[in-house]
Image: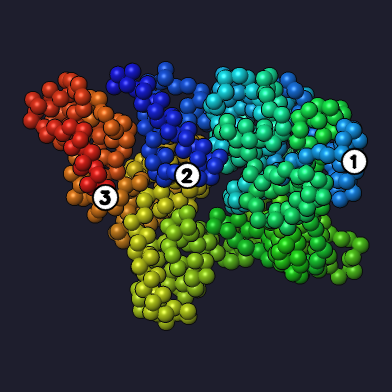
Amino acid sequence: MEEMKAREEINSLREDLNKYNHEYYVLDQPSVSDAIYDQKLHQLKELETAFPHLITADSPTQRVGGEPLDSFNKVQHQVPMLSLSNAFNENDLRDFDRRVKDGLGVEEVTYVCELKIDGLAVSLRYENGVFTQGATRGDGTTGEDITSNLRTIKSIPLRINETETIEVRGEAFMPQRSFLALNEAKEENGEEPFANPRNAAAGSLRQLDPKIAAKRNLDIFLYAVGQWESGALTAHSERLEHLSNLGFKTNPEWEKCATIDDVIAYVNGWVTKRSDLSYEIDGIVIKVDQLVYQEQLGATAKSPRWAIAYKFPAEEAITKLYDIELSVGRTGVVTPTAVLEPVKVAGTTVQRASLHNEDLIREKDIRINDTVVIKKAGDIIPEVVRVVTEEREGTEQPYHMPSQCPACDSELVRLDEEVALRCINPNCPAQLKEGLIHFVSRNAMNIDGLGEKVIEQLFEANLVKSIADIYQLKREQLLPLERMGEKSVDNLLQAIDVSKSNSLEKLLFGLGIRYVGSKAAKTLAMHFETMNNLKAATYEDLIAVNEIGDKMADSIVQYFSEEEVQQLVDQLKDLELNMSYLGQKPKVEEIADSPFYDKTIVLTGKMEELTRPEAKERIESLGGKVTGSVSKKTSLVIAGEEAGSKLDKANELGITVWDEQQLIDALNEMEK
Ligand code: IVH
């Protein structure tokens, strides 16, 4: 392709991708499917590989890049990043209101109340519209340059529509779902979990390798402007709106309050509503809205006088720890869990709390029958904070982890540097069961009606011991089981059957290959396209794929080298499970009668209505393959205006030629 054309297409793809990105990550209102997004990103990557000098730092393909750093550079903040003084109750808020009004000599001030996001403060610098530097707060004067990690946060625009240098500030954080998933994976890998989402976010942004931060699903809300020479706005609320108009993600829950009573009502409202949020907040920030007032009030060495942070009280409760139970995860990690006398914390009743590992039990000296203080870590996972030793009566029993697996009795081991104990028996029933539960789960094969309970039931009834057994279940075997009526059995068998045509990534993720999460599974499926290709891939083939690191590559090679795995894959093939990546393509039956199905198509010349990537995408989704040059293998040539040598060659070889309109008509007909 000529460079000019490539440049045009690259720009158009980038524009589309930036728009989709903003819709998805900032506005939470996607307008296209993931498949279309992935496809465009893939096309852009291909074009950039063909024309590497057209790659720019703000291209959507360049979020995760560069080699791991040795250390972070220091960044001097042009405008200091102050912190906030705290308020803990209504009185503190009224005192603040008084100080503000006395300081200004006025009787009316407008406040803006915002959620206090529990993450870490960062600053983002844009020069000529391009994100050039991101830094931590550090001591407020000097922070660390964490640009490459911040670039991986998809809600941070790499380009904005503002040519003047502008520095904006906000809170980077880890949403609760990502936090839970990360800790779960950490525990499964025998690593120490993060205590709360804030530590997890900070730990992720402090990684020297941006590939790690990229996997952590961090997010950000912007709430302030640092350096901005000609910022002509007069109120903080206007700045928030401006930030949002520039494409930044701002938190939508802020409100203007005309009186301190309104502020207090806002604060009290969030004490209960906070548990509905998908991210953690630790208070409310109250800011004077008028910027002239902010300037007049100024700041102390540490914090501005025009703002205050109301901190929610930590929610803790005291209860009795009755017992410690063990569970064996999918990868054999044995996790102790405290069984508690039910108690209410932060709005829900808690009766179990993970104790993570033996070290933690020892460190906190937790004994059976102890009275303990519990809280919800990041208000999500209940956690034992400490033992109330004053309540001990002498009957409390120290706890020792057993040396044998509670499920299969094999000797437990502690692998290098891991804090966790593991059962390494590949046939351990608890691991097998957890593996099956994972296999049928939503992000994996997503088999409706086959949840944890039913798997347990089938497992106990000896009907399902391995993944392949799921696909051999018979109606007669299921009917006698409890809670299995005719209808539910039929539905279940139908759902199992439907799952056979899942795209490869679902199966790959479901197999539970160590370190292969659902995102990596998708990357692998897209790249290798079939299970056979992936099975045959070498370590080198694997690490050559973007986003696949050496740990994962090793694990995949190791996995497929095992005889049992090979047998399982063959068995699943015989049971007619799909082993290919289907992408966003419709089902084969639906596209088999498309004029593009299994055809090799060449696009040439200028198109009026369709863009080249769009035409390619639509043809491919109908089963066609779009290639660059005309040969005997070409089945169809689409010739736009001023088509040149490719059209000549097509005529020479007697290949069918369509114009753009014929293409459009055929596409529309099929897509009806
Ligand atoms: S404004 C000079 N707004 O809270 C004012 N801070 O305890 C700068 N934080 O360092 C901060 N959410 O990391 C502001 N909506 C919000 C915030 C917020 C969280 C953090 C920020 C700050 C700390 C102060």
Identified by mark 2, the residue type is Pro
> Which is in the foreground here, disc 3 or disc 1?
1
Give the residue at the far front of this rendering.
107
**Residue 544 placed where, x, y %?**
43, 32
Q: Tell me the SS state at disc 1.
A: helix
Question: Residue drawn at (12%, 22%), measured in percent from left and top?
Answer: 648
Which label's residue is closer to the chain start, 3 or 2?
Answer: 2
Marker disc for residue 30: 2
Identified by mark 3, the residue type is Lys
Disc 1 designates what residue? 98
Q: Tell me the SS state at disc 3.
A: loop
Question: Residue drawn at (47%, 35%), measured in percent from left and top?
Answer: 19
Distance in Å between CA atoms under marks 3 and 1: 66 Å
299 with respect to 27 (left or right): right
Is 17 placed above or below 273 here? above
> Does label 2 point to a residue whose CB lies under 8 Å from ligand 1?
no
Give the residue at the far bottom of this rendering.
480
